[in-house]
Image: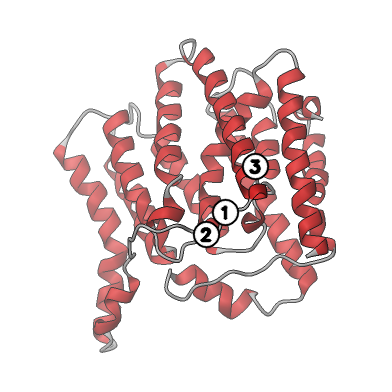
Amino acid sequence: MVFLFRDKSIINIFYLVILSIGVHLHFFFHAPLVISNTNDGVFSLFLQTYISDLPQTVLVIIYLAVLLLQAIRLNMILNDMRMFQTTTYTTAMAYVLLSGMLTQWCSISSALIANFLLIWLFIKLSRLYNNPSPKTLLFNTGLIVGVSVVCYHPTAILILVVLFALAVVRPFKLAEWVILLMGILVPYYFLASWLFLNDTIKTFPGYLPYLQLNLPLAQWNIPLIVSLSVLLIVLLAGLYCWQVTNKRMVIQIRKNWGVMMVMLLILLPIPFIFLHAGIESGLMSLVPLGAFAGNTFSYPRRLALPNILFWLCALIIIYNNWSFITG
C-alpha cells in the first residue's frame, strides 16, 4: 500500500479519500461524536451551537473533509519547503492513517479544528529564517497564537512553541521578542475591552487557560497501550530516518525540522497538563507526528519496514473499527 503514496500523481488524492474511508469505516454504523466543553474556548461553543445537532451523514462528511484538507495541506507545505528528498504523499497518508489509531481521535473536537491554526502557525514560523523584515511576520505569528488560545485553551502551550522556535531560528533581538509577545496579547486585549464595555469583565478569568497536572484517563486498557506503543514505534522510525538524512539538508530545512521537533515535544504532553482536555486534545500532536511519520514511509528504499509499520497500524485500526461497531 505504501508505494501508492510515493508518487507525485494527483490520483493520490483519490487514494487518500479511499484510505480515510477505510480508516474510519465505523462511520457507516456510528457517526463521529461531537466533543465540546464550554470551558475550553470559542471552538467548543461553536461546535455545541452549530455542529452537534447536524444529521449524522453531515457529521461524517465534515470530519472526513476536515481530515483530508489538513492532511493534503500539511503534505503540500512540506513538499514546497523541500523538507523531503522527493515529492510524495506519504505525509498525508501518515496523517490520515494515524488519525484512526486512537478511538478518541475519531471525533469532531476543538483539537481537530485547531490543527488548521497549527499548520498555519508552522508556515509562519518556517518563514522567519533569514527574513529581512520579520516584525510584521512575528506580530502575525503571535496574533495566530493569541487567537488560538481564545478559541481553544490547550493551544496556550503554543506560546512555548513560538518562543523556542524564535530562539532556534533567529539570533536574539529584544525588539522581535516584544513584537511577538504583543501579537499574542492583542486578542486578549480586545476581548477584555469588549467584556468591559458590556459590563461583564468579571467573566474574563473564564477565558484564560487552566493548567493542572492530571491523567486524561482513569483506566488504561491493553488496546490503548498497544495503540500508543505502535504510535511510538512509528515515531521512532520516523525520527531515525530523519536523523540519517538531516546532515545532507541545507540549513533552512534543518531549522524547519527543528521547529517541527519543538512542536512535537511540546504538544505531546497536552492531555496531561490541561484539566478536562482529554485524550482527544492529543490530536494536535498529529501535525508533527504526521510529518515525522512521513519520513518512515518515504525514505527507506526497500518497502519492507514501511509496509510492516503500515499493516501494524492497519491492525490497530481494524480493532478500533470493530470496537466502535460492536460497542
* For the residues bearing labels 1 and 2, Cβ distance under 8 angstroms: yes
The residue beneath circle 1 is 220
Horizontal relation, residue 135 to residue 61: left or right = left
Instruction: Please identify the quadrant where the C terminus is shown.
Output: bottom right
The answer to whether residue 20 is seen in the rendering is no
Q: Residue at x 49, y 10 (%)?
A: 248
Tell me if residue 203 comes above or below residue 112 in the rendering: below
Looking at the rendered structure, the secondary structure element under dot 1 is loop
Residue 304 location, quadrant: top right
Q: Nearer the viewer, residue 239 or 183?
A: 239
Identify the secondary structure beneath mark 2: loop
In this figure, which residue is indicated by the disc labeled 2?
217
Residue found farthest to the bottom:
199
- Density class for disc 1 (Cα within 10 Å; few <14, some 14-19, many ≥20) is few
- Colouring scheme applied when the structure was drawn: secondary structure
Horizontal and vertical percent for residue 102? 64, 51
Q: Is residue 106 visible?
A: yes
Tell me whether the residue at label 3 lies in contact with that at label 1, contact meaning CB atoms closer than 8 angstroms: no
The outermost residue toward the top is: 248
Q: Residues within 10 Å of mark 3 (few under 14, many from 20)?
A: few
> Cα distance, mark 3 to mark 2?
15 Å
Question: Is the N terminus in the top left, top right, bottom left or bottom right quadrant?
Answer: top right
Taking depth in this image into account, of 61 and 220 the one nearest to the observer is 220
Q: Which residue matches tag 3?
A: 226
